[in-house]
Image: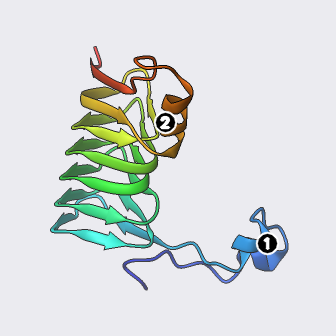
Amino acid sequence: MSIFRRENGPASPASSGGSSESPANSSQKRRLTHIAPGTLVQGTISGPTELLIEGEVQGEIRVDSLVMIGGDGAVEGPISAPVVRVGGRVVGDVRASDRVEVAASGSLEGDISAPRVVIAEGAFFKGRVEMTGEKSRETRRSKGPGEGNQKAQSETGKS
């Protein structure tokens, strides 16, 4: 039994011939670090694998893959990853190289810095959003002065 990665059963979709993965990904095993409900982790978390937080993390998160904060998950500290999905509670700045998504069940108190940001209706967000990265730079270059301001400040909340 492994604590930090998902164990596959004896029959996987790839071995049964019913794989929906692309050929390039079929030889790579999906790796996921799972912080289970009721678990408290204090300190810095870093690494190349996907991270699913359903417990609580107090500290910095720096990973090279997807970070998901489940509905019961909580993070106090900054998060840096290519993609961050918030379904639980985050208090800290979030920096993503691709996108940040805050689900309707999510709560984020901190600044967001990413090329793409999605904040669902009903989500709670308190902080600043700065659109960054190649996509926003190209947009700003194609527009005239004063037209491509990519910063926004927002406060929304559930009723």
The amino acid type of the residue labelled 1 equals Pro
User: In the image shown, does 65 or 29 lie closer to the viewer?
Assistant: 65
Q: Is residue 118 above or below residue 42?
A: above
Q: Residue 66: image x %, image y %? A: 46, 58
Q: Nearer the viewer, mark 2 or mark 1?
A: 2
Q: Residue 100: image x %, image y %? A: 42, 42
The residue carrying pointer 1 sits among few (fewer than 14), some (14 to 19) or many (20 or more) residues within 10 Å by Cα, namely: few
The residue carrying pointer 2 sits among few (fewer than 14), some (14 to 19) or many (20 or more) residues within 10 Å by Cα, namely: some
Residue corresponding to mark 1 = 23
Quick one: label 2 or label 1, which is nearer the N terminus?
1
| Rendering quarter of residue 152 | top left
User: In the image shown, does 16 or 107 lie closer to the viewer?
Assistant: 107
Q: How many marks?
A: 2
Indicate the quadrant containing the N terminus: top left, top right, bottom left or bottom right. Answer: bottom left
Q: Is residue 118 visible?
A: yes
Gap between marks 2 and 1 measured at Cα: 32 Å
Q: Which structural element holds mark 2? A: helix
Residue at point 29%, 50% (across, down): 73
In the picture, measured across the screen, residue 149 lies left or right of residue 159, that is right
Indicate the quadrant containing the C terminus: top left, top right, bottom left or bottom right. Answer: top left
Residue at point 37%, 79% (across, down): 3
The amino acid type of the residue labelled 2 equals Ser
Q: Residue 32: image x %, image y %? A: 46, 69
User: In the image shown, does 122 or 84 lie closer to the viewer?
Assistant: 84
Q: Which labelled disc corresponds to residue 14?
A: none
Residue corresponding to mark 2 = 136
User: In the image shown, does 61 or 54 lie closer to the viewer?
Assistant: 61
Q: Which structural element holds mark 1? A: helix
Residue farthest to the right? 17
**Colour logic:** rainbow
Residue farthest to the top? 159
